[in-house]
Image (cartoon, grey):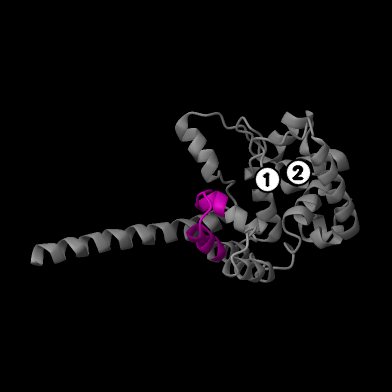
Amino acid sequence: MARRKKGMWRILRLGGMALALLVAIPLVLTPVYLIIDPVSVPMLQRYVSGQPVIRAWRDIGDISDRLKASVILSEDGQFCQHLGVDLGALRDEVEKVLAGEDARGASTITMQVARNLFLWNDHSYVRKALEIPLAFYIDLVMPKQRIMEIYLNIAEWGPEGQFGVAAGAERAFGIAPQNLDWRTATLLVTALPNPHLRRPGEPSAGMLRIADIVQNRTQQYGERASCVGEGGRLSL
């Protein structure tokens, strides 16, 4: 009996140490990422498995304002207003789940940054529960411009290991991310949900239709994305 209790305490102690480590990693690294450009978990997974990773970091000032605004209006319209989590959208998703309806996830850009930097990509309620406090913490530590800069440089944007908007724009259109016009910017945005299947350089009719919707929405409500512009203004 004493040996069994000792074994249980050892397991609990090891579990507690592992949990403390998991908590400590984002607590320590998030402030570090204010000045150090991070790599994402999917990038690390490709490095470890020997798969190619193509990423050229771009400062937020070297990325088209059209793309920045289009990403926000497409992915997270309240990005400049919320504190990392869109509580209204999250509440709606919880109500859908409780009602047995399909839920979209209510992931904000900040939550996606938290997932890509510190968690895993498989869908689960455990991962979602971890994303929420991490997103609040990231928003507390980082300014909106830095969160967006990291997001645009770690998002997967191509099927052969292209990460970040520079690699995505080069693969799709052969241009730098500061030279994106409305069509190329919005087509790049349409690829974000599934860059392995959606090819912005060879857009389907559905992608062209979505790009038009994103462009119209961004041109109409672009001021909602002003927090990521230089001096709080965007040149659209």
Q: Percent position (x, y) of residue 112?
A: 61, 54
Q: How many marks?
A: 2
Q: Which residue is drawn at 57% across and 70% down?
A: 98
Q: Is mark 1 on a helix, strand or loop?
A: loop
Q: For residue 57, which quarter of the picture?
A: top right
Are the residues flagged by discs 2 and 1 in contact, CB closer than 8 Å?
yes
Q: Is residue 120 magenta?
A: yes
**Along the line of sight, which residue is nearer the eye, 43 or 228?**
43
Tell whether 36 sits left or right of 157: left
* 96 left or right of 27 in image: right
Q: Mark 1 points at which residue?
A: 193
Callout 1: 10 Å neighbours few (<14), some, many (20+)?
Answer: few
Please name the residue shown 54% across and 54% down the image.
32
Residue 4 sits above or below residue 162 on the image = below
Q: Can residue 83 be seen in this view?
A: no
- The residue sitting at 15% across, 66% down in the picture is 5
Q: Where is residue 76 in the image (x, y as percent from the top left)?
A: 72, 58
> Would residue 170 be counted in the magenta stretch?
no
**Residue extending farthest front:** 100
To which residue does mark 2 refer? Answer: 190
| Residue 214 image offset from top left, x and y in percent | 83, 50
The three-letter amino acid code for the residue at tag 2 is: Thr
In this rendering, the answer to whether 218 lies above or below 101 is above
| The label number, if any, that marks residue 168 in the structure image | none
- Image position of 28 (left or right of 92): left
The segment highlighted magenta reads 115-132
Q: Name which quarter of the figure residue 175 lies in.
A: top right
Callout 2 environment at 10 Å: few (<14), some (14 to 19), or many (20+)?
A: many
For residue 162, above or below residue 234? above
Measured in 3D between alpha carbons, the distance from the residue under mark 2 to the one under mark 1, in whole angstroms, is: 7 Å
Q: Is residue 186 above or below residue 101?
A: above
Q: Give the amino acid at mark 1.
A: Pro
